[in-house]
Structure formats: C-alpha cells, structure tokens
Image (tube, coloured by chain):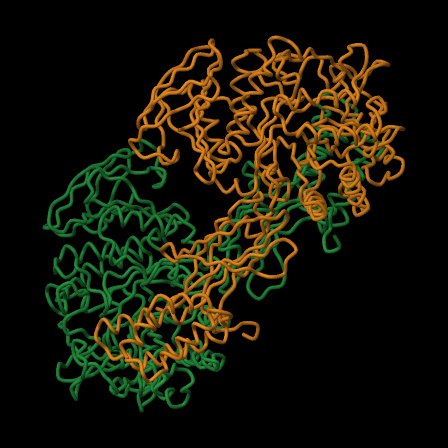
Chain colours: A green, B orange
Amino acid sequence: MQQLDGRKRVVIETVKPEIECGRFPIKRVVGDSIVVAARVFADGHDMVSAGLIYSPPACDDWIQVKLSATGNDWWQGNFTVDHLGVYRYSVRGWVDRFKTWRRDTRKKLDAGQDVSVDLITGGQLLVGATERAHGSDLIRLRAFHAMLDGSGVTLDEKLELALGAELARLMEDSPDITLSTRYEKVLEVIVDRKRAVFGAWYEMFPRSASPDPHRTGTLADVEARLPYVAGMGFDVLYLPPIHPIGRAYRKGKNNAAAARPNDAGSPWAIGSVEGGHQSIHPDLGTLDDFRRLVERSHDYGVEIAIDIAFQCSPDHPWVKEHPQWFRHRPDGTIQYAENPPKKYQDIYPIDFETADWENLWKALHGVLRFWLDQGVRIFRVDNPHTKAFPFWEWVIREVKRECPSVIFLAEAFTRPAVMYRLAKLGFTQSYTYFAWKRWRWELAEYARELAQTEAIEYFRPNFWPNTPDILTDQLQTGSRAMYQIRLILAATLSSSYGIYGPVFELMEHEPLRPASEEYLDSEKYQVRHWDLNSPDSLAPLITRVNQIRRENPALHSNWRLQVHETDNDALLCYSKRDAKGRNTILVVVNLDPGRRQWGFIHLDMAALGLRWSQEYQAHDLLTGARYGWLGARNYVELDPGARVPAHIFRIE
Amino acid sequence: MQQLDGRKRVVIETVKPEIECGRFPIKRVVGDSIVVAARVFADGHDMVSAGLIYSPPACDDWIQVKLSATGNDWWQGNFTVDHLGVYRYSVRGWVDRFKTWRRDTRKKLDAGQDVSVDLITGGQLLVGATERAHGSDLIRLRAFHAMLDGSGVTLDEKLELALGAELARLMEDSPDITLSTRYEKVLEVIVDRKRAVFGAWYEMFPRSASPDPHRTGTLADVEARLPYVAGMGFDVLYLPPIHPIGRAYRKGKNNAAAARPNDAGSPWAIGSVEGGHQSIHPDLGTLDDFRRLVERSHDYGVEIAIDIAFQCSPDHPWVKEHPQWFRHRPDGTIQYAENPPKKYQDIYPIDFETADWENLWKALHGVLRFWLDQGVRIFRVDNPHTKAFPFWEWVIREVKRECPSVIFLAEAFTRPAVMYRLAKLGFTQSYTYFAWKRWRWELAEYARELAQTEAIEYFRPNFWPNTPDILTDQLQTGSRAMYQIRLILAATLSSSYGIYGPVFELMEHEPLRPASEEYLDSEKYQVRHWDLNSPDSLAPLITRVNQIRRENPALHSNWRLQVHETDNDALLCYSKRDAKGRNTILVVVNLDPGRRQWGFIHLDMAALGLRWSQEYQAHDLLTGARYGWLGARNYVELDPGARVPAHIFRIE
C-alpha cells in the first residue's frame, strides 16, 4: 500500500505497438510517423484525457502530444522521429475534471437546473489551471477568471464563457496531471536511416572481379567495377569475406575434400598466418586499397557492405592466442564444425559457452569497431543463428550506440522463431524464405505475414532470388522468364532486395548435382571470370527495375503492401502506396515462365486510394503502355515469350 | 555485461497462458489441470530440453515437470492445482548436452564413422550426472560408468549401453541446468473452490419474505424460506443490502422523489442513526439472526451471499465521522450522486481521490472482514466500476490472502474494457451482457467470446435472465415460453447463473413504464408479498434444470463450450463436455417463444467426442425421450406450445 498512490484512478492497457511486453524495440526510419494506440479509462462516469509521451535519443525530457478517443476506450495519436538512435515512448492518462465539469454542466443547463454552484466549481478549476499555464495561455486564463469573477457580467454571459470553446482549449493545454497514471512500461523505437528499409544490394566475389582471365581479382578490380554496379542502380555492394584464408583442411574446387596446391579455398575459412578478421587477404590488396574502395564507392552512391563470419580456420591466430574460445575434445584436439555425419574440418566454431566469454565478446566487438574505423557501415552477418543470442543483442546495441547509422543484415535461413528472435534482438534486416516461395498462395501468404502482422514492427525482409548457397530449382531451369519473374518479385514485394552477381544477370544456372542448390564451379571454392558484356545479360532489365524503385516512393517500404485477388492462380497481383498516398504502384506477375496467362484481377480499390467505380490510368513503367481502367475488375494478359512477364503499373 | 551470464544460450518466449504480460493472474479451481505452452530454443544445432516449474501457495520451492516438444520450437506440459490460493509458474530451458551427444553419435555410427573419442565425451557427461543424481538413479549411473570404463566390455557393447533408453532416461532425470535460462516472468494462478465456476444463485429481498402479508419479512423468514430455495436446487442465496436505510431524501414507491411516512426506502441507501455497513436493519432482525441464517443455510447446502455497496446515505455514520471521504461542493454541501440531469440525493458516493484514502481503504476492508467473521464467504459487489480499480485489486488480494475461499461477484454492467479489467484485477465472477443477447448470432458470438478467447482465463460469467434492475423487453411479454428459454439458456450456457426471485419463477413482468427495464412496484422501493404456491410457478422446471446441472459434470464449467451450426436461425445449438470427456451435454433451444421451429443441426462430432459417422443416443433429460442418431446431421423440432421449447440431451 505504501508504494502506490491509491488515488490514481486511470488504467492504461494494451499499448500498441509493443513487442513482447516491451522487451524489444520496434523499428522505424528517420521521418516516419509512429501511430500509438492504447486503451485508457477510469472507473465511474468521469471523463479522461490521455497523452502520448516520447523522448528523442539522448534526451531526458518527455514531450507530450494529445491522444484522441477512437471509441470503446481506445485512444490514438502519433509522433514523428527525426533523429537516428533510440526513442522512448509511453502513454499517460488522467481524470479530466474540467472536461467532466463542462459535460455535466451543459446537461444540467439543458434540463433547466440551477448551476450557480457548478459555476463556482468551474472557476476553481480555472484557478488551478492558472498555476500550470504560461505565456499567452496564462494571460487568457486570467482574463477568463476576471470575467467569471466580475460583477458586471450576467450569469448567462458567464456560462457562455465558461462553457465556450476557447476556455476548453486553454484548459486542455494546461491539464491537471497530478493524479495521472503513466503506463508501467517505457517502450523503445530504434530509428535507422532510410537504407535500413530501402536498398538494392549486389553481391560479388572480389577475387572473380579481374577483367584479365589470367589473374585473380583484387580490391582495385572491384573499384573498377563500381560504374557497372552503380550503373545498374544498386545501392549496396556486398563483398564475401576478404580476409586471409586458412590452409589446413582447405576445400578444393566444387567443395572437394582436399585442395590442390593452387586452389583458392573458401573465403569463409577465415584466418591464416597472414592474419584473421582484421586483415585483408594479400591477393586482394591492402587495407589502404580497401579504404580507397570505400571512399570511391561513395562517389558512385554505393555503399560497401562486408561479411561478418565469426568462425575460424585452424590457422587463425586466435586458435593459438585464445584456445579457450574453442571447444576441446577429450583427445586434446579442437572440435571442428560438424553436422553429423558431415564434417567441416576447415572451420572451428567459436564456443560461446567459454568461461572467458567476456573477453571473447570484447574481441568480436573489436572486429566490428575495426571495420567501422575503415568506413564500413553495413555488415552482412553470416549464420548469426549459430552464435549466442545474448551476444548479438549486446554487440548490436553497443555498436549502434556509438554509431546509430550502422546496418546489420542477418543471414539466417532457419526456423521462424529463431529468425524473428534475431530481428527482435537488434538485426536491422533479415534474409527470408523468399527464394523458396514460388506459387501464388505461398507468395501471398508470406507477403501478408511480413507486411500485415506484428512482424512488420521488427522484421525487415531483404529478398534474394539467389545467393552463393542458393541456386533454386526454378533458376536451375535457366529460363530467362523465370529470372525476370524472380527479379521483379524480389524488387517490388520487398523494399530491400539483392542479387548475387554476375551469376544472376548472366543467368549462370548449372547445379553441382541434380537436386543440389550448390552452383557448379561455385565461386565459394574457386576464382571465376565473367563476361559482363554478354548480349543475354539481364543488366538492362535490372537497371530499369532499380530506376523504377528509386522513382516511386511506394516501393520504398513494405508498410502498405496489399495483395489483390486474381481469378488465375498463375497471376500474382499486389500493390504498394507511399505514406502520403501520393504514389501507388500495382504489380501483376505471371508466375508461369512457360505459358501466356490471362485473367481478371479484382482490386481492393481502397488500398489503391481509389473510389469504387473510379476511372484511372494504369501506366506500365516497364513498357510505357497506358491502360484506361474503370473500377475494380480488369483484364490482364502476360506472355513470357514477349518481353517481360510482368506489369509494374503506376496508378495515375 | 556484468549482470548477465552470456553463456546462457536458451531463449524462452510467448509463455501461455499469460494475461497482459503477467500483470494479472489466470484463474482456475481446485483439481484443474493447467496446460502451459512456450517457445523454447537455442542458437545452433544443439538440442534443448525444457521444464515447467511451479510453486504451490505459501511454498518457496519450485517443482519441475517436463515439457514436451510439440513442433516449431513450441513446448507443452501441465500441472494440477490441489490447493486454494495463489500458485506461481514459469518455464526453464537448457542446452541438453547428452541428448545432443546421443543424436550426433547415432548419426556418426550410422555413417560408419569412428566414435571412440565421442564415447569418452559421453562418459564425461555421465560423470557429471552422478554429481546431481540421488538414490537408485545414482546407483544405476555409477553402474553405467563402471561398465563404460571397464576393460571387459567391447566397444559395441559400450555403445549399446551409452545410446540405450535407460541411460537416456537417467540423464534426462538429472539434467545439467547450470546454464539454464529461466523465463523472465513468474506467472500466477488464483486457485478458487469449485463454487467460483459452478453454482446456481437465487436473489431475494428479505423484507418481502414474510408469509404474512400484514408484516415485513425478517431474516427469520428468510431462514424459513431455505427449504424452498434449496428444494429448487440453488447453491447460493444472495440478499440485497440488509443494513439500516437512510431517511434523508428517501425514495418512495416506484422511485417517487419523496417517500411517504411508511415507505421502506431503497436498501442501497445504506446507513442511518441505527448504523452503517456493519449493522443489520432493525426491521430484519439482529446480527444473531443473521449468524443463525448463515449456519442454517449450510444444513441445506446453500450459501448466503451478501451485497457490498460502498456508498452512503446522507444519514450514514461515516458522513459525520469521516467527512473527508466525500467530495464537498463550494457551498459546503456534500456532493450527492448524479448522472446529469438525474440526481440521486439519497446517495453520497465515496471519493476515492480523498487524501485520506489509506484510512478509507482500511475501513472498507474492515467491512469485508466484519462479514467474514459472521461466516459470509460470497460477496456480490454493487457497481464496482464506480469505485477505483487500485482499491479493488488491493482489497480482494488482502481478503483472499486471509481467506482464499472467498468469492467476489462483480455487478458491473458497463463497457467491455472495464468489465474485463475488474475480472483481471481479482473479481472471481462477473455479471454479463447475457440478459440483452437474444438472437442466435449474438448468443453464439458471446458464447465464443467468453469460452474460446483469452477471456476464459480470467473472466468467469454469471448469467442472469433478470435482476431487480433488469426486466428485459423479452420478459415483459410475460410469455411462459420466453421465461423457459431464458432460464435454460442461462443455466446451460454458463456454469454459474442466477435468477431474481420469486419474481422470476412467478413471471412477474409489468414494467414501471413502457420501454423501461424497471419493475412496476419494484421491491427496490417497497415490501412485496408473493404466492409461492401459484400453480403457474416455474419452480418445477427450475428444479429439474438445477438437478440436470448437478448430475452432469459437463455443465460444471465453460471450458469446452462449443456452438454447432443449425439451418434455422431460431434454433440455437451448443454442447459442453467435462474435462475427462466422460459426460457430454447437447442443448438445442427454440429462441422463438411464439412458433414451432424445426430444422437440421450440424454437429461438430469431434467436440462431442464422437467419430464422424457414429451411431449414438441423444437422451433428452427434460422429457426422458431418447433419439437414436447417426452422424452429424440431425432433425430437431421444438414447439413452445407443448411443454419446454428446448432439448437438454445427454449424448450416450
């Protein structure tokens, strides 16, 4: 009974958004408006008022904005986030004496009752407000007080003043919150830069970047490739690990158990006598080369993302320096990675249950700080789901506290609960199941899960049709239409997407074995050379799609993604709108790469910002064609043989 | 970093049941089994194990039972509550080294790999378990250790032992939980006695209990009425306030603004010179009479419930003794109750914002303790939604800590959020919107809301077809069939129900005014006399329905309430089963009191514990008729003109 003030009568319940009881923050980007709703009510018949309170990063003060009643004890309001970092928000509610008094006094007046005593009560409430108001509000409140107290004013005039709109506004702006209730939790929003939700990624192996087929590619070759990557409209250039590669148990071409003398090895077998996670592979160049690459990339509007793979080759310096960070077997050897009966003897996983975990965490944090110092702001994290969750939660918070513009992409292809947990605990973006979603029902279901459930508050998808590990059976067909379909789906369903090139644009599609998702002659194990000037390259389409993405704000987020009905299972139809409702994109994709498909689409007109039977124009941004449409039901026909098996319409 | 042990790798999420992030307890009754589910997982490929831990009332120890994996990282288990009071529960999870070792070693063996080092690792895990095991388990573990260490045992034999079922069981029972994670919240269950969910209530005004129409009824008359009430099968006899009634502004008959000299006044205008909330109205008798009534009621298997109305007449002793507990107007008068333009000058509401709130709370708590001392264990609380929520949460917890068998019924007819909040903060049972739910769709929807949403965890409905304040328009018709319909709906949809009698069984139905829900010549304002021997009385049907309720465990809770489809909107069909699946009741009600209605019902056979095309018998417990049915689709015909317009079938 001591801790509590029993006079606080207002209840605040069910604040939204709130992830796992406030255990985790929601996520937004700079400029976003956050709509907050809550149930706020009190006992009895008194009226309540409620405010949304929020506090910008590194600010101790709370700013209060009004919440409005939306019915059935629900209240709603919003605030805009303008700074990077962590905002806090909560809700406050209080019994509003003046609002109650105003309602009741009006009712008594309407019933012809005497309200002279009520008028005195109202005056007392007004005097209370003068003790809280400032500036012009205070002057006006004093003026009201003088008039209500004055002898030269009739009772009717006083009542008109006391019940008028101006005094109501003044009283609302200086509320008596001494007995207000604050929601028991303080909730958080992580505010990122826009790249956290909108960006086109391009992955390439630096060692395959050489224009000369007789030598290995270098960071300088990557630099020379920047015009090509930027020219296609990519925002992020992601490089697999650029560190020295171990020699012990090195894998050969096509993942052969034993390497031949000149085999390059897997970049994910990190560490050798030449260094570990803070070193550059000597064949690729120097740290200076890397820094120059980072700087030059800015000139092209491209950001360099690097790979963070916290695992070691047996030759990694840490194996000798910190043997306690690895698990030892009873025979004294260090436990290599395995997924029985498979063995990965070229990789030592880190033991996150080591008693020396604090020093381990500091060292791993040190790796990230090192690359921050080299100008990197985007980390693609390899298999984060095989490292301890508490480590990620801590290290991401530490890094973003120092540098809130950093973006972490989680490369976890695992069970739903694990993928969502990684997103909740701090990963900015996540790889997804998109590559394996092929049919209309599963694409539509997944789009709804990501865009229309609570997941959108914390899980930001990055859609990849392929990666060095994922050559899906759809792409193994080598069908040009299928590559086009997967590109357009990825780039328009998700505001963040990426491709692994030049493999993708050149439609490299031979698998290592039938039913394997591994590439034949995979760049993971050998150096490759690519003919970027191939006439078959998808680069022109990619360029156009990325241009459409940039020009249309509707495609810059997933918040207003809506799937529409079609009467042909081979046609997937969906739309996106920007927050202001000024830009609407409608996409129709023929999911069948082999046949012409046609049918009617049934549009949710409200989701497009259109009236039920409105005339409008569907302007195909891929072909330039314009269709005059009326109402919700429209005919569509898409032939994979002729040009692109999809429409990307702007609704005009 | 200091507070945390970074080595704890297991995550526990989404524990169910959990109300508002564990802010409120769930509710059960003695003997219930509580099913708990949670998502439990770790990073990587190690296997996890999980346990449900719980702690009985006033116990500091935790008991652990196993959780079983049910797929997609979900785990489930259950425990049974045998004691009154507050149980606590939570979930624990850990990386299970032995289970992981067993899985991986089997796989290696199957692939023909050498596992000699693995066998040593397994032996180390076994040694660890001997440090945690006791009794026969310890002896067996030591025996296993000796055999695995022994030289006379072949490798194959050792492997068979190490990977066998017995060692798996032994290791499972002595798990290594040093790095286990405990769910961050401790959740609570309030365990009540069975009356909290199952009971038939009868409300009557003691002053109308006199068999002699020339005098006012007394508590002794109520005592004489016990055979009648118990004979109909009621479990609880609830009496409106029995305290002295104020004289100031006393209301006359039919709520007349001014009472005539002999008018009895409203029992809810509590307090006069004769005393307040801890006194008995002198016309009703003495405290000894009350105590005797409580004692005699036990002989009839009936419990006395009293009314707790925390409000005062202007004559209540507290008005002089504690004027600070009431709100004062600027003219010095105390603020009477009002709902402008209506005035209730005979009632002073208590001001829960008084600075003296702590003494106020103690005094109100004192009222409850006083009646506990007189043997009362059930309180029907009048308008709890007009008193502060923090007070109720505190006082109910205080009372139930001293006496966990106490039942509080909340008489709040207000907005959904408020009704649910009162239930969450501690009220054992709640009045509902049942009286106003008439049509099939709204009865079915309400049944689903109460029985098939999270509400069932904390909101226990008590269905009343009428109360002294509620004479619905349906009952105003005076239709005998309508009274039968409302009785059967209340008694079979909800395991707790009640009627306000003898008004109900005598079908008193004249309203004060058309469209008013007030009774003409209401007992709230005057003494009435009733002819219980009327040949039209519904008492025989009520008696039969209460007997059916007692004999059929399916009707003792709402947990397995299922609404079934019918092809006639006038027919409502639903079923209930007991927890063990041994008793199944199927109810069909003709909601139309004026016409014969017929049609097909489409039964959810699984909800009835039946196979799809099974033959079974529907035994009508009201008429004794038996119908041989086959499968889900069956014909029903109900004529309100002939006997009862409903079937209460037992499925046999």
Nearer-the-camera pick, A613 or B32: B32
Q: Residue furthest front?
A: B152
Q: Look at the image and tell me whether residue A143 can be seen.
A: no
The residue that appears at 49% across and 38% down in the rendered structure is: B559
Q: Is residue A211 left or right of residue B267?
A: left
Q: Eyeballing the image, is B340 above or below A431? A: above
Q: Look at the image and tell me whether residue B342 can be seen.
A: yes
Q: Eyeballing the image, is B529 above or below B374? A: above
The residue that appears at 55% across and 29% down in the rendered structure is: B550
Determine the image quadrant of residue A220: bottom left
Q: Is residue B56 left or right of residue A497?
A: right
Determine the image quadrant of residue B288: top right
Determine the image quadrant of residue B208: top right
Nearer-the-camera pick, B478 or A319: B478
Tell me residue B617's x, y (percent).
37, 25
Tell me residue B262's x, y (percent).
85, 14
Report the label total. Answer: 0
Q: Eyeballing the image, is B317 above or below A90? A: above
Q: Is residue A270 left or right of residue B402?
A: left
Q: Is residue A471 left or right of residue A73?
A: left
Query: Which quadrant holds the C terminus of chain A?
Result: top left
Tell me residue A169's x, y (percent).
66, 41
Q: Eyeballing the image, is A8 above or below B97? A: above
Tell me residue A315's x, y (percent).
31, 88
